[in-house]
Amino acid sequence: MRILRIILATVAAIGLTSALSAADREPSLYERLGGKPAIQAVASDLVDRILLDQRVNKWFAHAAATPENASAYKAKLADFLCQNTGGPCQYTGRDMVTAHKGRGVTSDAFNAVVQDLTAALDKFKVPQKEKTDLLGIVATLKSSIVQK
């Protein structure tokens, strides 16, 4: 009987410790951005901006070809952002090197897309810390995307 009480006390302590550590953890960037609806809104606005941006829209001709292509691109981008900010989404597109290989993306084009992303984040009044954190993630992709 004493062993049973010790086991039950141990299980209860482990459960309490797990609950406390979950409550104490810092929210993910995904959560701080507002979850999937907020990420979808930013992705949609970003794609709209990119498709209008003469500096970069030539690289997105396929996405601009039909409303269905644009919607599919927005959904993939939202999944990519969601997954890379700690959200539950699964990005199923190609990796960045494969997706951009042979496309001749320049540093200026990458920077223009970052400017478009910044404008989208500003439109939705994303706080500076979250904006900086997201732009930091995007910055790590530059070497996989830029080829000129």
Image (cartoon, grey):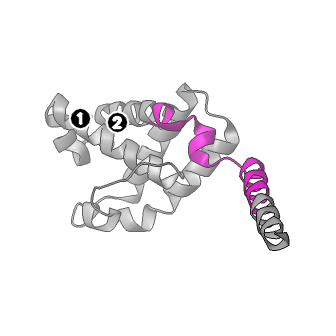
Residue 54 appears in the picture as rendered: no
- Residue at image mark 1: 70
Q: Quadrant of the C terminus?
A: bottom left
- Residue furthest to the left in view is 65
Q: Counting residues from the N terminus, which is met first, the one under dot 1 or under dot 2?
A: 2
Between marks 1 and 2, how big is the CA–CA gap? 8 Å
Q: What's the residue type where badge 2 is placed?
A: Val
**Magenta stretch: dominant secondary structure:** helix
Q: Is residue 134 above or below residue 18?
A: above
For residue 131: magenta? no
Q: Is the C-beta separation of discs 1 and 2 under 8 Å?
A: yes
Residue 140 appears in the picture as rendered: yes
Could you tell me which residue is drawn at 81 percent across and 61 percent down? 13
- Residue 143: horizontal and vertical position, in percent? 43, 68
Using a 10 Å C-alpha cutoff, classify the residue at mark 2 as few (fewer than 14 neighbours), some (14 to 19) or many (20 or more). many
- Residue 114: horizontal and vertical position, in percent? 47, 46
Q: Which residues are magenta?
A: 14-39
Could you tell me which residue is drawn at 16 percent across and 43 percent down? 62
Could you tell me which residue is drawn at 46 percent across and 47 percent down? 82
Q: Is residue 143 above or below residue 86?
A: below
User: Which image quadrant is residue 6 in?
Assistant: bottom right
- Residue 25: horizontal and vertical position, in percent? 73, 52
- Residue furthest to the right in view is 2
Residue 47, numbered circle: 2
Q: What's the residue type where badge 1 is placed?
A: Ala
6 lies left or right of 132: right
